[in-house]
Image: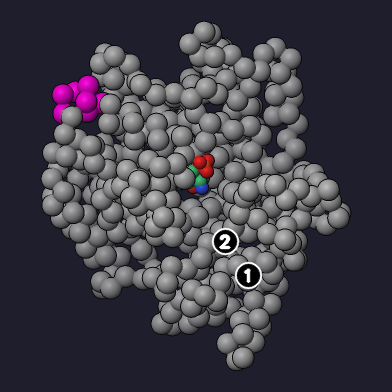
Amino acid sequence: MPSNALFYLTRDDMPLVSHADGIYMWDTQGRRYIDGCSGAITCNIGHNHPRVKEAMVRQLDKVAFSYRTQFESQVALDLADRMVELTRGELDKVFFVGSGSEAVESAIKLARQYFVAKGEPQRSRFVSLRPSYHGSTLGALGLTGYEPLEAPYKAITLGSIKVPSPDFYRYEETDIDAHIDAVLKQTESAMLTAGPETLAAFVLEPVGGASTGARMVNQAYLDGIRALCDRFGCLLIMDEVLSGMGRTGEWFAYQHWGVAPDILAMAKGLGSGYYPIAAMMARGDLVETVTDGGGFMHGHTYAGNPLACATGLAVIDAIDEENLIDNTREQGRHLRARLDELADKYGCIGQVRGIGLLQGVELVRDPTTKEPFPADLNAFDILTRLAKQRGLLIYPRRSLNGLRGDHVLITPPLTVTRQQIDDIVELFDDSLAAFETSIAGQEAS
Ligand code: PMP
């Protein structure tokens, strides 16, 4: 019997989940859904993966939990080594945690402790983008540039200096290059005003997720931000909680541009939904400074426990041995081409953006003027419900009072086949047709 004691953002028409396999999920009424968004862009290797289940059971048979101040575990050592390899050695220290927010908190604290240990205690401020999402705990929320989430907590969060995120859809300048130039100038000016000597780190998502509908950086922007950080002596933190672990067609999104961060946060795809595991990775010299200064004053009980690490290792093995990064590139191109066709067919699609199997679709009232739907229409929710009624899960985000449009993310597991992409697109096509009818009806009434 459904409980009403659960205290989540939930609603009455929520189905009860029954089971899942690959890209499919079923509810207890026997309805099948295509998981077109990997839950919350999490189940990168799909559901019910035999290799991961076997690895977890094997680990459970040995030891599920050991505490890091009492034992090392071979799986934690192996996973850390493996992750360093994935960054091609650019980041050579790994700190395990349990969620994306914890990974971002760890990054904030490592940056801060690094400057304290280095004798620059005045470096305590962070710069981040608007819009952005970095997590729900108070430090990570302080970096987040998303007004509805920030508003109730402003008085008690860390806070950060917010600078504009590059926007390749709505910009005032003559072209993208001029836009990036303007955004970088604004960023430089905000950092100068704040006082470069007070800055600890600049934080960004190379490819955004929920908050931006897969907005991306480009080479000039990332080069520019790296140069500003180096000039002002602050660190560059990248939040790849969502874009890491193969999602964009590279192990980490930053590898598309060859601009490495000093600290990296990752989560979702690492445990792929099988077990909560997340990580912060950092340059070894930063960690050494902190270690020499007395050690990192941070940690969580479940950090790096053997079951979590065995899960992460099995997920990486699956991505590697099943060539899921290549598949992500190939199916990502196919998905993008099919979504671009839908953008030609439906006026409500303003822009399709993203990379690999992280694709965002921005919804607009008028594609010529790029006018967003009114915020109170909840266009994102209407489309997401229509898709769910048709057996397709997509990930929604609302518009911000006309500042930019509603959008949805289409981010299936990296195991998706060409035929399954076509099935997703067919259901999405049908949902968009129903959406336009529904919107026309609402606007006429
Ligand atoms: N950063 C980014 C970029 C995210 O997408 C998320 C989760 N949506 C987080 C941080 C927070 O992760 P978690 O929900 O696991 O705490």
Residue 191 location (% of width, % of height): 18, 49
Which residue occupies 55% across, 40% down?
A: 268
| Residue at (64% x, 76% y) in the render | 435
Quick one: 321 or 154, which is closer to the camera?
A: 154
In the image, is 193 to the left or to the right of 98? left
Picture residue at 73% right of the left edge, 57% below the top: 14
Say left or right for 272 vs 179: right
- Dot 2 beta carbon under 8 Å from ligand 1: no
| Quadrant of residue 282 within the rendered picture | top left
> Disc 2 marks which amino acid?
Pro
Given the image, on which type of amino acid does mark 1 rest? Leu
Residue named by callout 2: 396
Sort mark 2 into few (<14), some (14-19) or many (20+) by Cα contacts within 10 Å: many
Q: Position of residue 409 (x, y in %)?
A: 56, 59
Q: Quadrant of the C terminus?
A: bottom right
Q: Relative to the observer, which residue lies in front, 163 or 409? A: 163
Earlier residue among tags 2 and 1: 1
Q: Is residue 115 magenta?
A: yes
> Residue most toward the top?
70
Q: Residue at x 71, y 18 (%)?
A: 60
List x then y, in percent, for residue 46: 68, 42
Residue 436 falls in image quadrant: bottom right
Q: Is residue 70 above or below residue 174?
A: above
Q: What are the residue bounds of the magenta stretch?
A: 114-120
Q: Is mark 1 within 8 Å of ligand 1?
A: no
Q: Is residue 232 left or right of residue 438?
A: left
Q: Secondary structure at mark 1?
A: helix
Residue 137 visible here? yes
Mark 2 lies on a secondary structure that is strand
Q: Which one is in front, 363 or 12?
A: 12
Q: Quadrant of residue 306?
A: top right
Determine which of the numbered discs, if any, sits on residue 383 in the image.
1
